Image: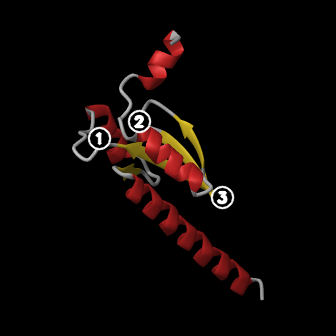
Amino acid sequence: MTSSQQFITQGRDANEPEIIAAFQAAGASVVKIHEYADLLVGYQGVTLLVEVKTLTGKFKPRQLDFQRDWRGQYWVVRSVEAALELIEATRKMVECLDGQANNENI
């Protein structure tokens, strides 16, 4: 393992690979990031900032500061089921917004 691979995997949550696989299986693109959240997830034109935690995982102080100060959406996912619920909620939001846009164009 190279030093850059160690950096990427060091400190990652044990359930992250299966959550990434679930997002990808649902049709999302996923990029691992490291600073304030774990993943950027793109689905149907929406970008989700996702922090992966195990069921008992705790937040680091810098993560709590980021959550407090961040003005966008920030999602915490603790299971594959939660990942798929987030995808489904995003799909419904996009569907709703598309419907509103179509009604405005009539």
* Mark-to-mark CA distance, 2 and 3: 22 Å
* Mark-to-mark CA distance, 2 and 1: 9 Å
**Residue at left offset 42%, top offset 51%:** 74
Residue bearing mark 2: 36
- In the rendered image, residue 100, in percent from the top left (x then y), is placed at 64, 81
**Residue at left offset 32%, top offset 46%:** 68
Residue bearing mark 1: 64
Task: Return the residue nearer the eye: 19 or 37.
Answer: 19
Name the element at disc 2: loop
Residue bearing mark 3: 45
Q: Is residue 13 above or below residue 102?
A: above
Q: Amino acid at mark 2?
A: Tyr
Task: Specify the farthest residue to the right.
Answer: 106
**Residue at left offset 23%, top offset 39%:** 58
Residue 1 bears which disc, if any? none
Quarter of the image for residue 63 reads top left
Task: Return the residue nearer the eye: 48 or 83.
Answer: 83
Circles 2 and 3: CB atoms closer than 8 Å: no
- In the rendered image, residue 98, in percent from the top left (x then y), is placed at 66, 75
Residue 48 in sight from this viewpoint: no
